[in-house]
Amino acid sequence: MFRVEQQSLSRRQLLQSFTEISSTANYDNIFFIQDAKKITLLSTMAPAAVIAPSILSADFGSLGKECSDTIGHGADWLHVDIMDGHFVPNITFGAPVVTKIRSHVDRPKEAFGKGTFDCHMMIAEPKKWVKEFQKAGCDLYCFHYEAAINSTAAESPEATSDEKTNPKELVKYIHSLGMRAGVAIKPGTSVDVLFDILDNPDKDAVPDMALVMTVEPGFGGQKFMPEMMPKVQELRKRYPELNIEVDGGLSEKTIDTAADAGANVIVAGSAVFGAQSPADVIAKLREAVNSRR
């Protein structure tokens, strides 16, 4: 995001100042904020599209190959759904499976790079499993806000602790282990709970991504909930450069709604893994997001 502040300049003069910084400015995404003393020019271009197919829809009989092929089809990340049967009424798989599929997909060469394992932790005790998934090859550990406010501060599966954790402390802990951190919210959770976390002056405790669930977590193949889009819109308005992920019911039919709201990280399961041409679907999802930047 570019920011220009000048005293007593007209809109035209501010636009000229902005174009000196960026000759590729998209004026449709430029906003002016004026008070008694200054005018501020803001460009609110969102981050580029990230397509993260959910391997919950892959063929588990050949999971490693499915993961490798999907990256080869043009996916940026792989979305790895971890469910424990407690936080959500379903069980998927754990760290040993992540270790196995990691050997089929090269580690990203940079933060948020191609091959990122985006582990969506739908589990009741998110702090207990951070180290295990870091060792397994997780790059982005995304926990649920609803779990983090009700869970223990114990740092291993077998440990116990009377101390409780909280989202800010958990983000900081994830960062300390060299991973990126995300915070997810269920459909019934207000987006307002994320603002205090994202506005934290301690940057080590600020998440790298927010995930807005567009279905109830726990099962794939559910219908997209467009009524969740105001959450995405509010996040994009407040945090122009934030990676905002949407998960649940995303396809070629629903991507425009999500992209219009400002989502840039797109989780799609059956829409990709069930397609005759996964590469074509990934390309169309990407274009829908990038065309709105």
Image (cartoon, rainbow, N blue to C red):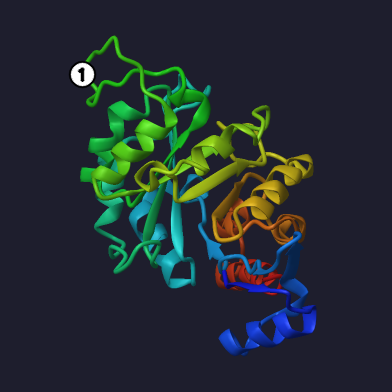
Give the image location of residue 206, x and y in percent.
Answer: 43, 44
- On screen, residue 239 versus residue 65, left or right, reads right
Q: Work out which quarter of the rendered image holds the C terminus and state it.
A: bottom right
Is residue 31 depicted above or below 227 in this figure?
A: below
Compared to 178, does 28 lie above or below? Answer: below
On the image, the x and y values in percent for residue 173 come to 29, 37
Q: Amino acid at mark 1?
A: Glu
Residue 157 falls in image quadrant: top left
Question: Residue at point 41% right, 34% down?
Answer: 168
Element on which disc 1 rests: loop
Q: Which residue is mark 1?
A: 158
Closest to the observer, 48 or 101? 48
Left or right of 236? Residue 10 is right
Quadrant occupied by the N terminus: bottom right
Residue 179: x %, y % from top left: 31, 49
Residue under the point 66% across and 37% down = 215
Q: Is residue 94 left or right of residue 28?
A: left
Residue 283 lies, with reference to residue 205, above or below; the image says below
**Of the pair 42 and 219, the residue shown nearer to us:** 42
Q: Residues within 10 Å of mark 1 (few under 14, many from 20)?
A: few
Q: How many marks?
A: 1
Residue 238 relative to residue 203: left or right: right
Query: Where residue 196 sits in the image (x, y, percent)?
Result: 54, 35
The residue that appears at 71% across and 55% down in the rendered structure is 258
Depth check, front residue: 255 or 148? 148
| Pick the front one: 107 or 43 | 43
